[in-house]
Image (tube, helix red, strand yellow):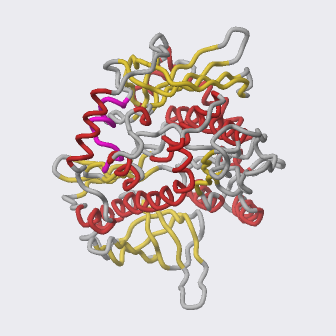
């Protein structure tokens, strides 16, 4: 799908910041502690600088959580080395820096600048896996057989050195030209293998284009961007690591999972019923994940089907367990066996397996604590008291900050759409129908439509045939309320 760009005039996001109560600058005390930590924290004794790690992120990113190195194993299969920035080595338990990270919860992104979880001296400096020297990291080594099955996992603190800061667009071009750097040469092969395994186990990955608001000179532009294949492959490495972390924590009876109920049978039946009229083939015996993975999101029918599939992925949460047990490995229950202390819900419906967040500690609070638990359990030593004490509080803290981050993302896009269309009320546009709301009581018929140009997604009144292209008239575009509305023309 091509990138669609529409230029918008000046937009003031300060009102959105105030409305959401987003934090401003870090206090002098927090900055002082962060600067001291950046100066005096020592690097781990375990030396993994011989591994040629590289980072892969958007070109503008400097808060680099992950570095990767991929290789083949002697005798067949693959070795995935994944270095994660060791934030816990720099954030002292009980200090003002830790308290500030709890108040923020995660990095929040707005078009006019991010609101970081940690001060830039750490998140874009001493802790970030930039290719300018040695860094402290938590190194995951995951061995796969030729079918992509995990056969061994190691996790340790180590000193690493990134060789290059790579970006998605450049690497995608290099893959096409056959010139991708050696540490990432196997990424399409391993990523594709892991994606196929994910679909087979029922994982549901929605490759929907993302709306983004970007700077454009003195103004802004609204962009509809489809994920590059290399982004999807890279995401599989993170998912692989998160599943390995979940297995360690479930086996140890202590941890923090990212959970989501499996798709409900009635939701699957509804999606299956929508497949045929939308022109989506659903072979006998095919899983939901396999069908979703086969759909092209660039056409109106495919986009509508994937929008319906999003209804399968509801109820994401953070689930803590084992916080009341002694801070030691203790009895080891296998994942999913319903052993003592394990939560009723351990799986993630989107991933198709138990899963944990451990790969983005620079940007997400929970990852620091889940990683520390994995390190302790894997080494057979007690989980640190500071991690155990935090465990029961993390689900509520992360749920709250997730809501704020989502509201910021959606609010920025709604504002850009309203500003962009403010002078065009009454005009007629071509649109694709993504979702349909049946009339009920006082609610009239309507649904959700997506314009081709500009790349806007909004509510629309009228009888909307799902997956069809129709003409719609803009009836409201109010930047003050961030509201855009259409009706069928």
Count the labels in the image: 0
Residue 117 falls inside the magenta stretch = yes
Q: Left of 335 or right of it: where is 174?
A: left
Relative to 26, residue 72 above or below: above
Task: Give how far across and how far down residue 184 sits, in percent.
Answer: 51, 20
Residue drawn 31% across the image and 75% down it: 481
The picture quadrant where one finds residue 40 is top left
The image shows residue 54, relative to residue 341, as above or below, that is above
Q: Quadrant of residue 378?
A: top right
Q: Nearer the viewer, residue 345 or 330?
A: 330
Residue shown at the point (31%, 60%) measured from the top left: 22
Left or right: where 163 falls relative to 480: right
The picture places residue 483, in percent across and down from the top left corner, at: 35, 73
Residue at 46% across / 74% down in the picture? 460
Front-most of residues 193 and 400: 400
Taking 27 as reference, is 486 above or below it?
below
Whole-percent x, y for residue 68 in the image: 50, 24
**Picture residue at 40% right of the left edge, 20% below the top:** 162
Farthest bottom residue in view: 442
Residue ranking furthest to the left: 218
Q: Nearer the viewer, residue 359 or 272?
A: 359
Query: Seen in the image, is 165 located left or right of residue 271?
Result: left
Please name whichever residue, 148 or 378, is drawn nearer the observer in this view of the structure.
Answer: 378
Q: Which segment did they paint magenta?
A: 115-128
């Amino acid at each position: 799908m091509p990138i669609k760009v529409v230029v918008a005039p000046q937009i003031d996001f300060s009102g959105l910041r105030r409305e959401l109560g987003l934090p401003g600058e870090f206090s002098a005390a927090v900055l002082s502690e962060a600067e001291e930590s950046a100066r005096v924290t020592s690097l781990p004794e375990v030396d993994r600088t011989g591994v040629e790690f590289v980072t892969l992120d958007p070109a503008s990113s400097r808060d680099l959580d992950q570095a990767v190195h991929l290789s083949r194993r002697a005798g067949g299969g693959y070795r995935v080395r994944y270095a994660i920035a060791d934030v816990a080595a720099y954030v002292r338990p009980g200090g003002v820096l830790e308290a500030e990270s709890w108040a923020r919860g995660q990095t929040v992104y707005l078009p006019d600048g991010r609101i970081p979880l940690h001060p830039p001296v750490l998140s874009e400096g001493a802790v970030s896996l930039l290719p300018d020297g040695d860094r402290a990291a938590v190194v995951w080594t995951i061995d796969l057989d030729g079918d992509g099955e995990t056969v061994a996992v190691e996790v340790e603190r180590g000193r690493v050195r990134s060789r290059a800061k790579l970006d998605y667009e450049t690497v995608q071009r290099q893959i096409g030209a056959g010139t991708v750097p050696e540490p990432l040469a196997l990424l399409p092969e391993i990523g594709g293998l892991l994606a196929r395994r994910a679909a087979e186990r029922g994982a549901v990955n929605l490759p929907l284009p993302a709306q983004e608001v970007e700077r454009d000179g003195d103004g802004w532009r609204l962009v509809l961007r489809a994920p590059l294949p290399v982004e999807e492959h890279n995401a599989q490495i993170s998912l692989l690591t998160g599943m390995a972390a979940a297995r360690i924590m479930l086996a140890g009876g202590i941890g923090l999972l990212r959970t989501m109920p499996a798709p409900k049978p009635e939701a699957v039946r509804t999606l299956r019923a929508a497949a045929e009229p939308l022109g989506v083939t659903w072979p006998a015996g095919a899983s939901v994940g396999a069908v979703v993975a086969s759909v092209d999101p660039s056409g109106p029918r495919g986009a509508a089907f994937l929008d319906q599939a999003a209804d399968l992925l509801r109820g994401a949460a953070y689930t803590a367990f084992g916080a009341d047990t002694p801070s030691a490995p203790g009895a080891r229950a296998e994942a999913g066996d319903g052993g003592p202390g394990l939560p009723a819900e351990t799986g993630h419906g989107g991933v198709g397996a138990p899963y944990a967040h451990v790969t983005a500690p620079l940007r997400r609070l929970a990852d620091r604590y889940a990683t520390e638990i994995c390190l302790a359990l894997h080494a057979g030593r007690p989980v640190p008291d500071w991690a155990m004490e935090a465990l029961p509080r993390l689900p509520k803290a992360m749920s709250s900050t997730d809501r704020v981050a989502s509201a910021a993302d959606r609010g920025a896009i709604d504002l850009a759409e309203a500003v962009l269309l403010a002078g065009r009320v009454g005009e007629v546009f071509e649109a694709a129908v993504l979702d349909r709301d049946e009339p009920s009581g006082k609610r009239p018929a309507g649904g959700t439509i997506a314009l081709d140009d500009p790349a806007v997604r909004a509510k629309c009144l009228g009888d909307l045939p799902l997956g069809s292209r129709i003409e719609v008239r803009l009836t409201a575009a109010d930047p003050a309320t961030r509201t855009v509305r259409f009706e069928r023309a």
